[in-house]
């Protein structure tokens, strides 16, 4: 029997006794029944809160379980990506080694010219831009961020260089 039913039973017994609340015994029993009634109300509230907390705990437990599965899945993805990148780098490295062997066998005059790229910084806004040799030879560009005209001086400033046609950008 639940405590609510037991309280109802005790109340019924007390009413059946027809206690006189003007007597000491009547007042004590009446006060005890009132106290039991308040305790029962409090317990009901605690039970409801406990039930709600249990539901919340179950929801959090399920969320943690799903997060754990997601973390495991992400770990597997990262591992797969790392393995793939490692294989790709190995392939590229192997390919570069083969290219190096081929280049040793070929005449240097048959090699295509390499493109050189330069990183410049706009003095006005600080934007960093990458340009190629062709853009450098044009003598200038506009900053893509602020529109500042950026000019390039291609004269060689290496005192050891005696090439009159040197543009200076191949010196270390």
Image: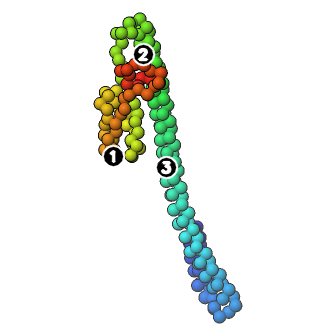
Mark sitting earlier along the chain (3/1) = 3
The image shows residue 43, relative to residue 111, as above or below, that is: below
Front-most of 132 and 22?
Answer: 132
Query: Would you say residue 43 is visible in this rendering?
Result: yes
The number of callouts visible is 3
- Give the colouring mode of the picture: rainbow
Instruction: Find the distance from the CA under tag 2 to the CA under tag 3.
Output: 47 Å
Q: Nearer the viewer, mark 2 or mark 3?
A: 2
Mark sitting earlier along the chain (2/1) = 2
Front-most of 3 and 162?
Answer: 162
Q: Which residue is mark 3?
A: 63
Contact, CB < 8 Å: mark 3 with mark 1? no
Identify the disc placed on residue 95: 2
Horizontal and vertical percent for residue 150? 34, 39
Horizontal and vertical percent for residue 80? 46, 29
Identify the disc placed on residue 146: 1
Identify the disc placed on residue 112: none
Horizontal and vertical percent for residue 6? 59, 73
Horizontal and vertical percent for residue 158? 46, 25
* Side (left or right) of 90 relative to 150: right
Instruction: Find the distance from the CA under tag 2 to the CA under tag 1.
Output: 41 Å
Q: Secondary structure at mark 2?
A: helix
**Which quadrant: the N terminus?**
bottom right
């Amino acid at each position: 029997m639940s405590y609510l039913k037991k309280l109802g039973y005790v109340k019924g017994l007390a009413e059946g006794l027809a206690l006189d609340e003007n007597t000491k015994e009547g007042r004590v029993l009446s006060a005890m029944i009132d106290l039991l009634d308040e305790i029962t109300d409090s317990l009901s509230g605690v039970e409801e809160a406990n039930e709600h907390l249990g539901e919340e705990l179950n929801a959090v437990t399920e969320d943690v379980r799903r997060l754990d599965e997601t973390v495991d899945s992400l770990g597997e993805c990262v591992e797969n990506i790392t393995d793939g990148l490692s294989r790709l780098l190995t392939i590229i490295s192997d390919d570069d080694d083969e290219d190096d062997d081929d280049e040793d066998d070929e005449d240097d005059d048959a090699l295509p010219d390499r493109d050189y790229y330069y990183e410049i910084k706009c003095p006005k806004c600080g934007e960093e831009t990458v340009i190629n040799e062709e853009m450098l030879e044009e003598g200038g560009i506009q900053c893509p961020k602020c529109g500042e005209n950026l000019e390039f001086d291609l004269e060689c400033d290496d005192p050891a260089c005696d090439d009159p046609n040197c543009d200076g950008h191949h010196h270390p």
